[in-house]
Each structure stands twice: as C-alpha cells, then as structure tokens.
C-alpha cells in the first residue's frame, strides 16, 4: 500500500533550509509515494524550491502535490477541501503531518485523521491516532477550533462524535467539558426517546445563549409525567421533531417509519381519550354501543384482527372508525385519504419493512407536512409544542 503524506504548511516559522531538508529527508526515510502540501497558494514557491533541493541532494525527483486553501478561516470550507483531496488517494495509507501547521489547521487535520483512521506525524515521529489520549497540538488557544467542530457535530445531531471529541480534547476537571458533556448526553439520549429526568439548573445557568433550552427542560418534565394533561400532545410533537431530524440527515426511510408511528399514536390517543377504545384491546360490545351506522360497523368488525385473547384494529380501520364517528381527526384523514394511502402503500414496500422501495426527500417532506396537519387537528397548539421540543443549535 502506498503512503501519502498530507503536510499542513500554513505556518513555517523555521529557516527555509531546515524546512527543505526536513521534507526532503522525510520523503526518503519514510518512503512516501507523495507529499501533499496543504496551505494557501503561497506554498507554490516553496514546492518549486523543494523539487530543486531534493533533486540536488538525492539526484532523483520528488513527487509533490498541493491542496490550495483560499480561505484558511472557514472551517467548513477546509473540511470539504480536505475530504475532496483525500478521495484522490483511495486505498492509500495517509499520514497527516502537522509540524508546520497553524493551531486551527492542525486541529482540523487531527480531527480528519480521527474520522478516517489516519495516522499523524510531528517531525519524524508517526503516531497511530487510536493510541493517543491527548494530542500535543491541542493548546488553550486552539480549543476554539475544536469547540467549533464539537458544536457543529451537536447541531448536526452527531452527538457521539461531539462527545468523543470533547473527551479527547478536554480535561475531565474542566468545567467547559463537564457542561458540554452533560448537554450532549441529554440530547443524545433524548434523540432515542430516553427522557432523562434530573435537575438541569447548572445547564440553564451555563448555556444562557441557548434560548430554547428552558422550554426544552420544561418539555422533558412533561414527557416524564404520563399523568400530565399535555403528555400526549408533547409526545406527538417530539415524535414529529424526531422524524424531522431524520429528514434533515437525509434518512428518509427512517423518517417515514417514525412519522407512520406518529399517526398510529395520534389515532390511539384520540380513540381512547374521546371514546374509551384501546386500539390494541378492542371490545366488540363497546363498538356496538357507539353511534355508528350498521353498514359501517359491520365493515369495522370484519376488519378487526383477533390475536387471542384480544381484538386489535388497524391504522386505516381506526381512521375509518373515527370518520364514522364524525371525529375531526377522522374527517381530516378522509379529506386527505388519497395522499395518505399513496404514502402508506409505499411504506409497506419500504426497504425497512417488506420490500426495496426507498423514499425520497419530497415524499418524506410531504408525509411530514401531512402528519403535522393531523397533529394540529388533534391539538390546535401543536406548533407551540413543536417549538418547545425542538433541539437547540449553537451559534458558530
């Protein structure tokens, strides 16, 4: 396997002769196939000098390449350029050398190394990224760059990466680490519907710039109390927001499954709260006592699924029942029936259910809008609850 060296070179604070000798010697002794210099376009003059130096010293050509960064302050841009360049060397053993890299560029380089499983190099020593507990490059003045990536990962719902970077770069006794660890864990668990109930006063005091955080904490209290009168409304809002995060991540099939489950939940609570009917424990006598026309009742009874010792009712039959009860949720479904049915049919052949169909963004977004509209019929204040359960975003 060929070895490629990515040399971060936006800061060269050593004499030119020493730098030329370092890279020329590194190329030979480490047997790199190529050195890729990562810097601004000013590096081109150095590359030309290095080629001449290596030719005179070793009487052979040195294989060099460059990754020009036009904006060394824009971390998003730097990451994208890095990833694009890495793609040019598939199946290569890539080593990132940060000897002459600035704090910011070195932090990005080390994070790239961690993400892709590359090694890093300081001067001549090459280290395996997986064996490093705390990188030498991480100094107080470079933590802002690392924190940018932590915040960006948090904003992208990549809570595991945010937590791993935090643990890697910050001391256990650091207050910043403690607070960020706690808030990352809060939302990592919440994203899996694990509602942790505890005192979050310290977080509220520390993250005063996260305006939605107080409402989030109030929402957590409601989601932990099934006896709260707003529990079901907040549960529905949280399920919708969870699906929205999957859409934002382009996990459309996953989003559809969550939205479908939200519809089931809306039906369940509507049937039970207003009519005392449990969707998965239907009592035939109770159905007969409802004010439903005989023809419709007969059709509903025929559709009941019997699994000893209980009857259950399907989602579409539940909507039909609500429609025949002249319930607002049932009427909403009836007026949008064709749109729902199209999505349900594809859902049944989804790659996550029984087939190979994959949803696209437009379909997932349409399903999202339909579910939100039905949730609004269930509770006209749903937009307020959606806002209160929306995860915060750091300003970066």
Image (tube, rainbow, N blue to C red):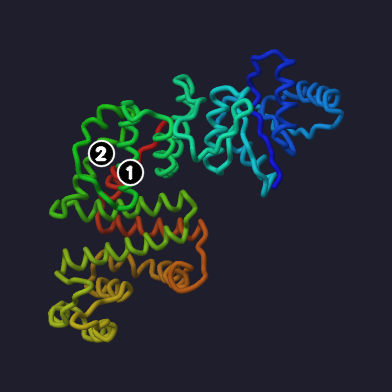
State the image quarter where residue 69 is shown: top right
320 left or right of 365 in image: left
293 left or right of 208 in image: left
| Residue sitting nearer the eye, 9 or 311 | 9
Residue 217 vertical placement versus 224 (above, below): above
Picture coordinates of residue 177, whole percent (x, y): 35, 30
| Residue sitting nearer the eye, 196 or 370 | 196
| Residue sitting nearer the eye, 302 or 338 | 302
Distance from Cα at disc 2 to Cα at disc 1: 14 Å
Q: Helix or strand or loop: what does disc 2 sit on?
A: helix
Report the residue marked by disc 2. Answer: 215
Residue 321 vertical placement versus 142 (above, below): below
Picture coordinates of residue 55, whole percent (x, y): 85, 26
Picture coordinates of residue 47, whole percent (x, y): 77, 25
Which residue: 30% across, 66% down? Answer: 264
Which residue: 19% across, 37% down? Answer: 199
Picture coordinates of residue 217, whole percent (x, y): 24, 40
Classed neighbour count for the residue bearing mark 1: other residues with Cα under 10 Å, few (<14), some (14–19), many (≥20): some
Closer to viewer: mark 2 or mark 1 = 1
State the image quarter where residue 327 is shown: bottom left
Q: Quadrant of the C terminus?
A: top left
Report the residue marked by disc 1. Answer: 187
Residue 127 vertical placement versus 45 (above, below): below
| Residue sitting nearer the eye, 326 or 116 | 116
> Residue 76 got which mark?
none
Classed neighbour count for the residue bearing mark 2: other residues with Cα under 10 Å, few (<14), some (14–19), many (≥20): some
Which residue: 40% across, 67% down? Answer: 340
Return the disc, 2 or 1, that comes first in the chain's sequence: 1
């Amino acid at each position: 396997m060929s070895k490629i060296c990515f040399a971060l070179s936006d800061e060269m604070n050593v004499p030119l002769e020493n730098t030329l000798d370092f890279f020329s010697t590194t190329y030979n002794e480490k047997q790199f196939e190529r050195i890729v210099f990562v810097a601004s376009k000013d590096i081109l003059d150095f590359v030309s000098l290095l080629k001449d130096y290596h030719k005179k010293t070793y009487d052979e050509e040195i294989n060099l390449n460059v990754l020009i960064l036009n904006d060394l302050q824009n971390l998003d841009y730097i990451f994208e350029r890095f990833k694009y360049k890495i793609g040019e060397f598939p199946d290569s053993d890539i080593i990132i050398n940060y000897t002459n890299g600035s704090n910011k560029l070195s932090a990005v380089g080390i994070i790239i190394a961690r993400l892709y499983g590359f090694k890093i190099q300081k001067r001549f020593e090459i280290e395996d990224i997986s064996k490093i507990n705390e990188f030498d490059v991480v100094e107080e003045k470079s933590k802002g760059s690392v924190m940018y990536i932590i915040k960006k990962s948090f904003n992208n719902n990549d809570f595991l990466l945010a937590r791993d970077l935090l643990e890697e770069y910050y001391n256990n006794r650091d207050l910043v680490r403690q607070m960020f660890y706690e808030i990352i864990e809060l939302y990592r668990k919440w994203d899996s519907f694990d509602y942790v109930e505890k005192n979050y006063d310290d977080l509220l005091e520390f993250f005063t710039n996260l305006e939605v955080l107080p409402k989030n904490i109030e929402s957590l209290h409601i989601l932990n109390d099934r006896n709260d009168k707003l529990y079901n409304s907040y549960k529905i809002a949280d399920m919708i927001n969870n699906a929205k995060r999957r859409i934002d991540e382009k996990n459309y099939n996953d989003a559809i499954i969550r939205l479908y489950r939200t519809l089931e939940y809306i039906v369940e609570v509507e049937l039970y709260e207003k009519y005392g009917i449990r969707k998965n424990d239907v009592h035939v006598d109770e159905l007969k006592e409802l004010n439903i026309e005989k023809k419709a009742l007969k059709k509903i009874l025929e559709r009941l699924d019997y699994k000893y010792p209980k009857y259950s009712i399907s989602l579409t039959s539940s909507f039909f029942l609500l429609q025949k009860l002249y319930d607002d949720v049932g009427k909403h479904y009836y007026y949008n029936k064709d749109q729902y049915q199209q999505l349900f049919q594809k859902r049944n052949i989804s790659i996550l259910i029984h087939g190979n169909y994959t949803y696209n963004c437009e379909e997932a977004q349409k399903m999202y809008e339909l579910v939100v509209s039905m949730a609004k019929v269930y509770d006209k204040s749903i937009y307020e609850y959606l806002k209160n359960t929306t995860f915060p975003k750091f300003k970066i």
